[in-house]
Image (cartoon, coloured by chain):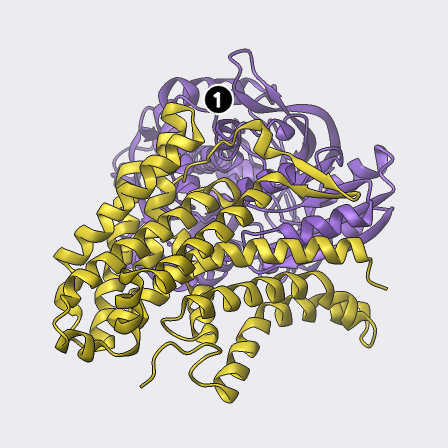
Chain colours: A yellow, B purple
Amino acid sequence: MVDPALLFEQLFNGVQYGILLFLLAAGLTLVFGIMDMMNLAHGSLYMMGAYIAATVTLAADSFLLGIAVALPATLILGVVLEVIVLRRLYDRGHLDQVLATFGMILFFNELVRLIWGPEGIEVPLPTILNQSLTLFTIPLPIYRIVVIAVGLLVAAFLYFLVVKTRTGMLIRAGASNREMIGALGIDIKRVFTLVFGLGAALAALAGVMAGPIFAATIGMGEHILIQVLVVIVIGGIGSIRGAFVGALLIGVIEILGRSFLDDLFKLFMPVNAAETAAPAVASMLIYILMAGVLFFRPQGLFPARSG
Amino acid sequence: MKKALVFGISALALTLAGPQAIAAKAKKIKIGFVTTLSGGPGVIGKDMRNSVQIALDHLGGKMGGIPVEVIFEDDQVKPEVGKQKTEKLLHKDKVDIVSGFIWSHVVLASRNSVVKAGKFLIISNAGTSKIAGRLCHKNIFSTSWQNDQVPMAMGEVLNKRGVKSLYVVAPNYAAGRDMVAGVERTFKGKILGKDLTKWPTQLDFSAELAKARASKADGVFIFYPGRATNAFMRQYAQAGLTKTPLYSVFSVDSLSLPKLQQAKLQNVLGTYSTQFWSPDLDTPVNKKFVADYRKKFGSYPSHYGAQSYDSIMLIDSAVRAVGGDLKKMDAMRAAFRKADYGSVRGKYVYGNNHFPIQDFYLREVVKDSDGKWTTKIVQKVYSNHQDVYAKKCKMKKTW
């Protein structure tokens, strides 16, 4: 039988992983949904955020200062990128956008290699965050609790921003009908720049949060971006709520699959076969879920766009 | 032996024999060195290149009086690129010898190109079971080890230390599965759980660590090379597993330790790993190699570097044995087989599959006198150990 304490711990891990995906997905889904822009370089902003934070953290010996510098710096980088490069791509097809932003991934990877070298940077955490906290005999890493807390705060902030403010109204309007909002005399370009900057800052936050878990490395954005795209597809393009639910879903499925699938398989398979099949199937689970969602609800769980 | 001696003497005689011999002597020795120079694993390639540089410094840039040129190529950890670069080295640069290779799958893809061109291949790292076994070849030599040997040594260590139960975590690819098979072959206790993680994309180990802790195993065995080492180590600490001893192979080395120290992961200090070499291995050659490397590059070399240094020195021994006449393939092969050169690990012999029969050690992570983290040899685990795949190699040992 499954140990309830282990199950709880794995759910916690799943939620934490989902929160990290959410931070990335929130920015990407806004950019994709509102600007109809396929931005693969989102992962590069995540990487830049992680590197900037790591550098400042090491130089100043303060993780908080690292965050404080990395977020605005990446936001500015995002805005500059939007103004210089991406603006020219809005009217082009998705294929052009994919090509151009893929080029930007290569550019940023090489840039990081030139500046910081190929090794990657380890981000030291204050000792207190590098430990675990025992809750009902279950040890939970303190840093991962912090990540969850930050993620929930961001989710609350985005909810407030999108639902309660005028800016949010524009964002929602932009997501459901771009042409109409332009026709109503709203400067859609400014909304775009704002959204892109916001997305960049969120990506940087995800990078900063990921740094102390995975370390800042070249190409760190590409691997995670694939899962983030799955989140967006499942959640519904352009929907923050969809990104939140989708990210948690993916996080929990990914972790639970890795945790319990081999035991499950062992119930009806020889041990050796189960040990080789389980990791392979576990890594496919989220794609199977995506295929299922696409089949039954092609627009995602929480579609933002009306048509 | 006798044959080799005759070859040696005749080679020596030829160098003294005047104009004819001088004509046969190469004007320049070209060595093609395939490694990884881009991306994250470029760190390994850098260490190998630095070590080749130290070897050339020690040789004064010459082998048997002939100037040496080493041409480095980047395989990008891709088999198809590795093969293409190998072909380029062989046919465009016309190198005399091919060396290097970090990755098993890359060397497997490139092997045939070298064999077909009739050149020697001196493998500096990749220890694939296939080339040690069925795909062994008279012109292929290794200056490293066969993958399984290192985790097998770790299994023996665990038995000796009274570890009764183990949890195993490794990436799900060829080398990862080799490592798991290796430790399973010698470890006599119970393996309470085993996770093979997606490689190389999975860097989150929360699920696996929670399972490892829940299993209450005496120890955790891992194989996570490259950047995954650091991600794993740091999550190990954060998951509160520091009281469970961690045993690793090919993970904690001179390349990852500075980074782990930078991240202040105190739990890494005191962890154990097995290897054929360590920066503190007490041989005259190794002392000189490590000291000169540290003087020039400011850090400890890794085993990748040590093996690369040995590759160059092994080649030098063969070139000198034939007096620079690289066309004498048989005489060169005889010289390679003798392994009669100053290896960083001390004297070793070649098995029938041209893989070293050598000692393996248990190493512990310690602080050196400057406070830098490094590995120190605790004890010898295996003496003159031969890999298990040698039996599958059809070559007979005649030397």
Quadrant holding the C terminus of chain A? bottom left
Residue B281 horizontal/vertical position (percent): 60, 23
Q: Residue at x 68, y 71 (%)?
A: A277
Mark 1 Cα-neighbour bin, 10 Å: few <14, some 14–19, many ≥20: many
The residue under label 1 is which amino acid type? Answer: Val
Asked if residue B105 is positioned above or below residue B385 in the image, the reply reads below
Q: Residue at x 71, y 52 (%)?
A: A9
Local SS, label 1: helix
Q: Residue furthest top?
A: B369
The residue nearer to you, when weighing B89 against A50, is: A50
Q: Residue furthest bottom?
A: A296
Asked if residue B386 is positioned above or below residue A200 in the image, the reply reads above
Asked if residue B313 is positioned above or below residue B39 in the image, the reply reads above
Left or right position of A80 against B367? left
Quadrant holding the N terminus of chain A? bottom right
Left or right position of B117 against A170? right
Residue B100 horizontal/vertical position (percent): 43, 46
Residue B157 horizontal/vertical position (percent): 78, 36
Q: Residue at x 49, y 31 (%)?
A: A124
- Identify the residue position indicated by label 1 in the image: B290
Say if residue B132 shows up in the picture: no
The residue nearer to you, when weighing A266 against B330, is: A266
When asked about the image quadrant of residue A111, the answer is top left
The residue nearer to you, when weighing B70 against A65, is: A65
